[in-house]
Image (cartoon, helix red, strand yellow):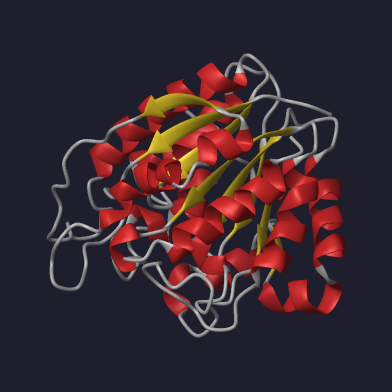
Amino acid sequence: MHRPIAIVGAPSSIGIRPYDEGGMRRLDLAPGVLRDQGILTRLSARDLGDVVPAPYRDFVRPPGRPRNENDVANYSRELAAKVRVGADDGSFVLVLGGDCSIVLGGLLGARGTGELPVGLVYVDAHGDFATPEESATGSAASMCLALATGRGDTPLARLGGEAPLARLEDVVIIGRRDDAEPYYGQDALRASAILDLPHDAVRERGTADIAQATLDRLTRSDLGGFWIHVDADVLDPSVMPAVDSPEPNGLSLNELAELLTPLARHPKAVGLEVTIYDPKLDPDRASAARLVTLLERVLGGV
């Protein structure tokens, strides 16, 4: 199989809490830094440019609401339109983020105007299944899996209209290791119809088995395709320290590449977005170089 690759930049930090000292997180720099590492040439990809968000507003968290709620909703729609441009001509769409809330725009774009729903592969160290009331930070990024599946009293959970962007039974979450932090909605996640494959399951079963279980769930005939979310914090901090909420004992680069390659190269994969890489925490750009090498390994055969 050979498909062209279209790259979209999502330089957004509006879906995540500020740094502890109060300034906006510099995830907005990530698409430019990854381009500087030669990702376009290394993937023989065409560049569809960036979708730029509104300025950051909610440095003080609104009570019971996601930060920058309306702006995240508008941004998701704008990003979705750009994703559709790439997907409509059959390209595999790679979105360079950005905070985790960009998954909403990627998933909305992957749905396009197709009659069939789409699935979601959520590769992340955190479950991100909190509601706005449950979230410890008010970041849309800490609740975006919940929002994608329609959980929560917020317009961000209704971007797809009456139906959620993804049905619970059409979601697979892989690699989370957040059970020590109960404010990510883990109890509700475990009780849901989502296929939950936490980090321990990946280590026990191996990446090949986990990838196959994911494809078995998401390549059914009643689904029009699937979107892949990859949070860089699923990697171990020893190889990917430049993230906002590092968790110990994550995946190695080889493990993540082995997991993602059969998913991204499946013909029903619409695209993939990579999130949470923060160039401000990566002064020597070592983490950026590793991410681009990982993406080249995973997508080089697309």
- Percent from the top left, x then y, of residue 137? 29, 67
Left or right: residue 131 compared with residue 164: left
- Is the residue 247 above or below the residue 164 in the image? below
Pinpoint residue 232: horizontal percent, then vertical percent.
51, 61
Q: Is residue 231 visible?
A: no
Tally of marks: 0
Where 126 sits versus 44, above or below? below
Q: Quadrant of residue 105?
A: top left
For the C terminus, give its image quadrant.
top right
231 w.r.t. 34: above or below = below
Q: Nearer the viewer, residue 172 or 55?
A: 55
Residue sitting at 30 percent across and 57 percent down?
Answer: 16
Left or right of residue 157, residue 6 in this image: right
Percent x, y of residue 192: 65, 60
User: Visible in this render: residue 217?
Assistant: yes
The quadrant of the picture occupied by the N terminus is: top right
